[in-house]
C-alpha cells in the first residue's frame, strides 16, 4: 500500500501534473498541501474519475489541505485541536479500514515561521506543540498512524544543501529541530531515515537562483509513522523528477510503501 504526500503549491495550477503523477504512481492514499482554494473550487470530479475518494479543508488563496484515498473514509476531521482562534486550513485527519484494521492518517501543512522576529515563529512553535499533543494522544490507540505533509522542518544538516546558510531560518533553528525531535521521541519514525542515511535527498527546491539545477535543496516534506505503521514499512521514495516538469511545484512527492493489506 502506497501512502504519499505532496505540497502541490496550488491545485488548480498543478492539476495536470497531479493527474499525470497519480496515473503513473497510483498511490492508495495521498495527502496534498497548499491547495490554495476553497472547498467548492477543488477539482473533485477529475480526481474521483481516477477512483479516489476526496476530502478537502480549503482556504481561499492560502494554505489548504486535502486527502485522496482509494479506500472509503470511515471518518474525517479538519483542524488541529489546541487553538480555537486558529482558522488556517492546515490539518485534515482521515481513517480508513483495511484488512488488518484501521489506518489513521493526518495530512498537515505546518507554518513556515519566517521571519523569526515576527509573531509567525511563535505561531509555528505553538502549532508544533499542538501537533505533539495530538500525536501523544493518538499513539495511545496503538494503531497504524501516519503524519504526512509539509512540515517546514529541516531535521538535520544532511537534509539541506548549505546548513550554515539556514542556521537562523525558522525551518532550521534549534527550537524547530528540537520540536521535531520531540515527535520522534514519542515513538514516531521518520520513514525516509528508517531506510537510508544518504545525504542530499531533498523534497523542495526554491524557484530562485537555479536551486533545482544546482541541487540546492531541502528535505522538509515528511512521513512520520507510529510503531504499528513503521513495523510494516517496505520502502520510501522521493519523486524528484517532477521538479523538472514545466511550471512545477517547488515541492515533489514523497511516498512510503507499507504492507498494511496483508492478512
Image (cartoon, helix red, strand yellow):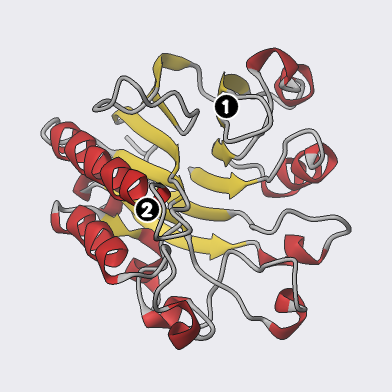
Q: Is residue 125 left or right of residue 164?
A: left
Question: From where the camera sits, is residue 117 visible?
Answer: yes
Describe the element under mark 2 as helix, strand or loop: helix
Residue 61 image offset from top left, x and y in percent: 68, 31
Residue 156 image offset from top left, x and y in percent: 35, 76
User: Which residue: 67% across, 66% down?
Assistant: 240
User: Which residue: 67% across, 45% down?
Assistant: 8
**Front: mark 1 or 2:** 2
Q: In terms of depth relative to the viewer, which is nearer, 138 or 10?
A: 10
Describe the element under mark 1 as helix, strand or loop: loop
Residue 39 image offset from top left, x and y in percent: 64, 16
How far is disc 1 from disc 2 in space, using C-alphas? 36 Å
* Disc 2: which residue: 121
Number of labels in the image equals 2
Quadrant in which residue 138 is drawn:
top left
Which label was assigned to residue 70? 1
Quadrant in which residue 132 is drawn:
top left
Q: In terms of depth relative to the viewer, which is nearer, 190 or 214?
A: 214
Question: From where the camera sits, is residue 232 visible?
Answer: no
Residue 139 image offset from top left, x and y in percent: 16, 38
Compared to residue 184, the image places residue 244 above or below, namely below
- Give the quarter of the figure containing the C terminus: top left
User: Which residue: 14% across, 58% down?
Assistant: 185
Q: Is residue 223 left or right of residue 47?
A: left
Q: Is residue 50 left or right of residue 149?
A: right
Compared to residue 152, the image places residue 84 above or below, namely above
For the view shown, which residue lies furthest in the right direction?
Answer: 246
Choose the circle earlier in sequence order: 1 or 2.
Answer: 1
For the view shown, which residue lies furthest in the left direction?
Answer: 140
| Residue count near mark 1 (Cα–Cα under 10 Å), binned few <14, some 14–19, many ≥20 | some
Q: In terms of depth relative to the viewer, which is nearer, 1 or 55?
A: 55
For the view shown, which residue lies furthest in the front direction?
Answer: 117
Amino acid at each position: 500500500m502506497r501512502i504519499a504526500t505532496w505540497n502541490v503549491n496550488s491545485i488548480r495550477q498543478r492539476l495536470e501534473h497531479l493527474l499525470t503523477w497519480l496515473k503513473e504512481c497510483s498511490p492508495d492514499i495521498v495527502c496534498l498541501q497548499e491547495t490554495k482554494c476553497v472547498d467548492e473550487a477543488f477539482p473533485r470530479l477529475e480526481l474521483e474519475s481516477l477512483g479516489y475518494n476526496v476530502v478537502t479543508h480549503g482556504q481561499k488563496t492560502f494554505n489548504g489541505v486535502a486527502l485522496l484515498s482509494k479506500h472509503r473514509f470511515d471518518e474525517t476531521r479538519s483542524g488541529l485541536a489546541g487553538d480555537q482562534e486558529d482558522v488556517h486550513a492546515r490539518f485534515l485527519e482521515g481513517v480508513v479500514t483495511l484488512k488488518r484494521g484501521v489506518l489513521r492518517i493526518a495530512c498537515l501543512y505546518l507554518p513556515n515561521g519566517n521571519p523569526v522576529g515576527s509573531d509567525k515563529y511563535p505561531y509555528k512553535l505553538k502549532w508544533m506543540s499542538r501537533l505533539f499533543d495530538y500525536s501523544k494522544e493518538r499513539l495511545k490507540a496503538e494503531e497504524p498512524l501516519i503524519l504526512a505533509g509539509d512540515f517546514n522542518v529541516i531535521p538535520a544538516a544532511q537534509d539541506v544543501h548549505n546548513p550554515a546558510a539556514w542556521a537562523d531560518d525558522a525551518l532550521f533553528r534549534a527550537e524547530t529541530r528540537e520540536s521535531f525531535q520531540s515527535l520522534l521521541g514519542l515513538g514516531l519514525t521518520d520513514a525516509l531515515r528508517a531506510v537510508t542515511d544518504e545525504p542530499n535527498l531533498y523534497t523542495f527546491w526554491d524557484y530562485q537562483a537555479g536551486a533545482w539545477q544546482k541541487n540546492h535543496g531541502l528535505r522538509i516534506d515528511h512521513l512520520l509513522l507510529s510503531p504499528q505503521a513503521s513495523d510494516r514499512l517496505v520502502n520510501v521514495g522521493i519523486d524528484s523528477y517532477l521538479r523538472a516538469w514545466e511550471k512545477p511545484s517547488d515541492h515533489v512527492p514523497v511516498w512510503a510503501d507499507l504492507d498494511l493489506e496483508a492478512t
